[in-house]
Image (cartoon, helix red, strand yellow):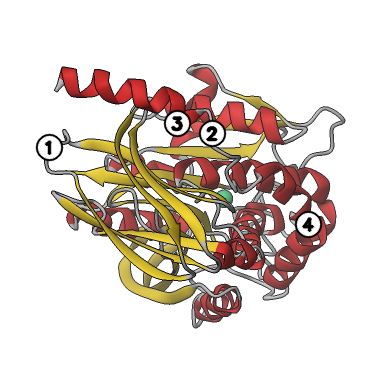
Amino acid sequence: MKKFFTLLLISSTVWMGSLTAQNTVDLESLMPQINADSLLRTVTDLQNFGSRYALRPGGNHEVAEYLVTRLNNYGITAVIDTFHLSGQHWLVGLYDQDFYNVRGVLTAAEPIDDSLVLIGAHLDAISYDHATWELLEIAPGADDNASGVAVMIEMARICHDNHLRFHRDIHFMAFDGEELGLFGSYYDAGRRNDADEKIAVMINNDMVSYQPDENWRLMLHWYNNSLDVVSRAADLCAQYTNIDPYIPTLSENGNYNASDSYAYYQNGFRTVFAIEYTFSTSYHTDHDVADSNNYAYHADVARYNLAMLAEYADLADGLGTEEQQDVVSMQVYPNPVSDKAVIRYQLTEASPVSITITDMMGRVLLRQDVSNQAAGIYLEEVDLARFPAGVYLCQLQTTRGTETTKLVKR
Ligand SMILES: [Zn+2]
């Protein structure tokens, strides 16, 4: 094996020099599309339900329906996942109610593995008189947590408008019954745990639009099963937004159990929880209205989320627009592969073609050249039987550029 590597390294040195620039999706160029008005629209729509208190007659079914429609409009298959709970709650007493989670799925293009990325926020709200604990009829929940749901919907819009494709499935979740004890997230995380699902990261946003200060900060609550996630989240926030990420100390991290991410953590999943650094003064009151929010700040929180999705769901290179797909489009299957993989590609014009398989260090392990090929659809078989299990890059080079796909060998 060692000798094989050395020989191929020599040929790769010559080869790498002639690689042209890849058609990568430029994350930076997507960021300006994230839009304060679009976030405000979702927050306003949610506030206009009057109350999103989960135990009101009929519960949050109509809210869930609204979110399913919004996701569907962005080409995302979404369903209402109904569950029933009864019990007793310290504030509201006995309950016996249907609850309504929303789950939308954006399916991966050429998945790198069988894990998914989940972006979620709770759809319910609550308001009460903070002196008497008496529940109030109006629960606008604009910051808590229409703001988090609006980020989730904005991500769906950006993915749709830019034809974004990822190498992991993205699950868009809205949780019911959070205010009563993380009901919707415990239900969902428990079911995913039972089903042995793999989640690369659960990205939680809860109260991300209140920001009266000049210096914007975002608190990133962390979980000790995924410290690398919070560290990466802080990096991405600093890189793509005007917000200073703030990773709390252990004693400042107490609210880590106060939102839906905690239910995922409890089920063994990796997660991070973003919340405004300056806590809303209208928390759980009928004053938590859309007008109190800062939508420029909110849009930056959404930008941090897009960077997280790009990173953890592995935004596909060279597949960002229909135009790029038009030039040459490559698919590799099966993926993951155990021995032979088929590379299917389409040329829209005649071109010499080179297919290479490299390891993650860029070492070329296999190369197949065709001197000139007419326009058309081609299938090329590559034999990976002798390769160790791991992640490889499959590159297709033509006169129009290079397309790269990750390939997982079992
Ligand atoms: Zn909340």
Q: Nearer the viewer, mark 1 or mark 2?
A: 2
Q: Quadrant of residue 100?
A: bottom left
Q: Secondary structure at mark 3?
A: helix
Q: Are marks 1 and 2 in contact (CB under 8 Å)?
A: no
Mark earlier in primary sequence (1, 2): 2
Label 1 – label 2 distance at C-alpha: 27 Å
> Which residue lies under the disc numbered 4?
35
**Is residue 286 rendered to the left or right of residue 250?**
right
Position of the C terminus by quadrant: top left
Q: What distance separates the C-alpha of mark 4 from that of mark 1?
A: 49 Å
Mark 2 and mark 3 residues within 8 Å of each other at the beta carbon: yes
First of labels 3, 1 by sequence position: 3
Q: Secondary structure at mark 2?
A: loop
Q: Amino acid at mark 4?
A: Asn
Q: Amino acid at mark 1?
A: Arg
Q: How many marks?
A: 4
Residue holding disc 2:
18
State yes or no: discs 3 and 1 in contact (Cβ < 8 Å). no
Residue furthest right as drawn: 214
Q: Nearer the viewer, residue 160 or 82?
A: 160
Q: What's the CA distance linking mark 3 and mark 1?
A: 22 Å
Q: Which residue is more in the foreground, 321 or 296?
A: 321
Mark linked to residue 386: 1
What is the CA distance from the residue labelled 4 to the residue labelled 2? Answer: 40 Å
Q: Earlier in the sequence, mark 4 or mark 1?
A: 4
Name the residue tied to disc 3.
15
